[in-house]
């Protein structure tokens, strides 16, 4: 790559915030794509704490790294690099993207041949090969915004009237003149920015690409959608787009845009739509979050309560021979039986692994013991029947076993309840990379089904499945539902081509060259994923994180409820003072001793893992934190709590 010291063809600007692994993959693809172009690369890091800056300095020393002491926002960070750039074209590029090898060659050739081009974007696809409609967009006028907010653009995506927001009536595989470009990949002439100004820093995040695109067209230039290249955009990694916070920030940005570019009635109408959208989308987000997290527990609570109610009816008539139990049986006993069993199931992690029946049995038995203990503490006039508790244990077990069996059958089309994973994965790459991958996947998930590898170089290994030309046949024969591409031997262009051909029925991951992690995304709305050796930490698993949170709450409640007994002891008073913070989730009883950015995040601890170290500057803290996260149990928290 030849670099001219005074002027270049292309300046690439990447703003990063806590996505180290995605940034590394992005930069590797960028370097592959600038082999024939005079280019410079800027990475503006907005105070990441995940080791991003250290990675760039060590692995990409040629990159112009700008390290901010705080998160300055997307617009300001881009402007910092643009002011230092000397390229004829400026490319704004998200860190969670991958560009094919010929991407920049093609788009710059198109730009050079299109003199009225002010800005340019390309088709974007998510980590599952789904086309992202925001690759081309129309101006969000009040009318267009209204159609989007009420969902008419989704109902009639091809309509020239209702589908203007994403320009769904324009073929995705053809070049078009468009109004709005996406900031994830936005090529702009430097000459244009010199005339219209840089990104508006009023926009902290979101909306700045709409504003810049609009100003480009207002100045007499045109924005183009160039179909001659395509990129992967792992949407959702830097921000969670289904969160209430995202909804608020995004639509607040739209209000800023309206106040800047619309006047009079149009502005008021637009802002009205925006406010309606904020509350509407926020409500949907909360409902969606609740359903995703608690639907199984809620459904099983209903099943448990109904089964106990029917058991009570049977017990009254056929066992006790009475008309009915007192109303407290229905208002006190059955609800607390239900809650105890559900909490026990949650505490033991059976909702994270709903088909692990050994966990379910353990959960129900523990719940039964707790119910009997509470029953024994109740006054005599509330002692109705231990038989219902004991027999209810069998009934609840049968109901939950039957329900989960049915659910498993409908979802997986099998009655095989072994813990064997339903993931069947193959690598497209070399035999050497396959051996490395097998070790990573074995660490990540012990039951991962690693079928074999595909390579054009024939191998005597029994795990060699065939060549790339036989890919579709291999997928059909072996029932493959996951492909992993090795960038050392497979081009990004080929990866995108296969993703487009096979579609979202298969999960896709890539291994960047000279890397030991696997990266990908299973949905345009989900966070990007990566996994490697460190993923096997206990605190990476919801089961253990749930147990830790339950321990925090129970211990805090125990201290608060028994405070009259301990109020005169100085050591206990200290713990009592932190109990409210722990109860509210601001702290955890045991936390890390160091700033362990590579470990699963937890709240600041009242006590730390280095409680036994006399020299707090010995450097052993990170090792202790790693061991704590890897081998976490509730017993460890209790031991540290009692020792401090």
Image (cartoon, helix red, strand yellow):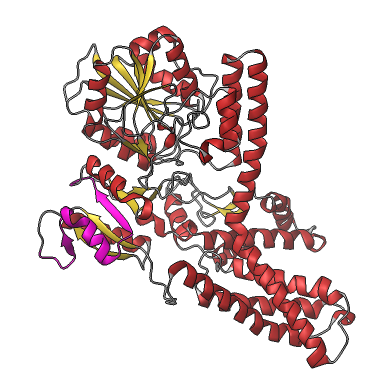
Region rendered in magenta: 460-489
For residue 190, what is the image quadrant? top left
- In the rendered image, residue 308, in percent from the top left (x then y), is placed at 73, 78
Q: How many marks?
A: 0
Front residue of 15/641: it is 15
- Residue at 30 percent across and 17 percent down: it is 89
For residue 566, say whether it is visible: no
Q: Is residue 515 above or below residue 49?
A: below
Left or right of 237? Residue 569 is right
Front residue of 64/616: it is 64
Left or right of 404? Residue 177 is left
- In the rendered image, residue 590, in percent from the top left (x then y), is placed at 58, 55
Left or right of 465? Residue 575 is right
- Residue at 41 percent across and 38 percent down: it is 132
The quarter in which the N terminus is drawn is: top left
- Residue at 64 percent across and 69 percent down: it is 300
- In the rendered image, residue 620, in percent from the top left (x then y), is placed at 43, 51
The quarter in which the C terminus is drawn is: bottom right
Q: Is residue 357 above or below residue 176?
A: below
- Asked if residue 466 is among those painted magenta in the image, a careful observer would answer yes
- In the rendered image, residue 443, in percent from the top left (x then y), is placed at 34, 62
Q: In this view, does 565 lie above or below 488?
A: below
Left or right of 511? Residue 332 is right
- Asked if residue 484 is among those painted magenta in the image, a careful observer would answer yes
- Residue at 58 percent across and 25 percent down: it is 143
């Amino acid at each position: 790559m030849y670099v001219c010291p005074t002027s270049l063809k292309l300046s690439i600007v990447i703003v990063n915030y806590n996505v180290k692994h995605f940034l590394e993959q992005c930069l590797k693809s960028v370097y592959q794509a600038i082999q024939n172009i005079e280019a410079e690369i800027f990475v503006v890091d907005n105070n990441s704490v995940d080791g991003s800056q250290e990675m760039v300095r060590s692995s990409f020393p040629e990159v112009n790294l700008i390290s901010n002491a705080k998160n300055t926002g997307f617009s300001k960070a881009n402007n910092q690099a643009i002011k230092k750039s000397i390229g004829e074209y400026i490319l704004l590029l998200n860190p969670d993207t991958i560009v094919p090898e010929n991407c920049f060659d093609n788009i710059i050739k198109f730009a050079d041949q299109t003199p009225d081009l002010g800005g340019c974007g390309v088709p974007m696809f998510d980590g599952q090969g789904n086309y992202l409609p925001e690759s081309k967009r129309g101006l969000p006028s009040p009318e267009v915004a209204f159609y989007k907010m009420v969902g008419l653009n989704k109902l009639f995506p091809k309509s020239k009237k209702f589908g203007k927001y994403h320009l769904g009536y324009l073929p995705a595989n053809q070049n078009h003149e468009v109004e709005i470009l996406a900031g994830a990949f936005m090529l702009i002439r430097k000459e244009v920015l010199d005339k219209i100004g840089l990104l508006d820093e009023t926009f902290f995040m979101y909306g700045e690409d709409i504003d810049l695109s609009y100003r480009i067209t207002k100045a007499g230039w045109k924005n183009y959608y160039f179909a001659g290249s395509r990129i992967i955009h792992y949407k959702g990694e830097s921000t969670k787009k289904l969160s209430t916070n995202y909804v608020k920030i995004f639509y607040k940005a739209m209000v800023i845009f309206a106040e800047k570019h619309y006047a009079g009635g149009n502005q008021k109408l637009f802002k009205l739509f925006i406010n309606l959208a904020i509350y509407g989308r926020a409500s949907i987000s909360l409902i969606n979050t609740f359903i995703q997290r608690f639907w199984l527990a809620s459904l099983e609570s209903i099943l448990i309560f109904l089964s106990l109610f029917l058991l009570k009816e049977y017990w009254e008539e056929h066992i006790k021979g009475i008309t009915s139990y007192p109303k407290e049986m229905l208002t006190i006993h059955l609800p607390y039986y239900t809650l105890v069993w559900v909490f026990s199931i949650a505490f033991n992690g059976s909702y994270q692994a709903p088909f692990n029946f050994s966990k379910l049995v353990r959960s129900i038995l523990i719940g039964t013991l707790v119910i009997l203990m509470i029953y024994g503490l109740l006054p005599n006039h509330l002692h109705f029947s231990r038989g219902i508790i004991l027999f209810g244990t069998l009934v609840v077990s049968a109901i939950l076993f039957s329900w989960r069996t049915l659910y498993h059958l409908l979802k997986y089309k099998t009655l095989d309840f072994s813990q064997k994973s339903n993931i069947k994965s193959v690598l497209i790459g070399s035999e050497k990379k396959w051996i490395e991958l097998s070790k990573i996947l074995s660490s990540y998930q012990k039951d991962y089904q690693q079928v074999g590898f595909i390579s054009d170089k024939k191998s005597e290994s029994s795990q060699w499945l065939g060549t790339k030309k036989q890919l579709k046949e291999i997928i059909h024969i072996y029932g493959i539902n996951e492909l992993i591409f090795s960038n050392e031997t497979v081009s990004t262009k080929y990866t995108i081509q296969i993703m487009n051909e096979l579609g979202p029925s298969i999960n896709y991951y890539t291994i960047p060259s000279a890397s030991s992690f696997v990266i990908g995304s299973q949905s345009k709305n989900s966070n990007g994923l990566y996994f490697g050796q460190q993923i096997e930490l206990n605190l990476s698993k919801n089961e253990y994180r749930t147990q830790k949170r339950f321990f925090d709450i129970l211990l805090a409640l125990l201290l608060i409820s028994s405070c009259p007994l301990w109020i005169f002891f100085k050591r206990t008073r200290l713990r009592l003072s932190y109990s409210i913070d722990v109860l509210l989730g601001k702290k955890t009883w045991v936390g890390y001793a160091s700033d362990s950015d590579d470990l699963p995040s937890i709240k600041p601890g009242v006590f730390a893992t280095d409680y036994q170290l006399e020299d707090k500057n010995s450097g052993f803290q990170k090792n202790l934190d790693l061991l704590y996260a890897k081998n976490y149990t509730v017993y460890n928290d209790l031991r540290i709590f009692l020792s401090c």
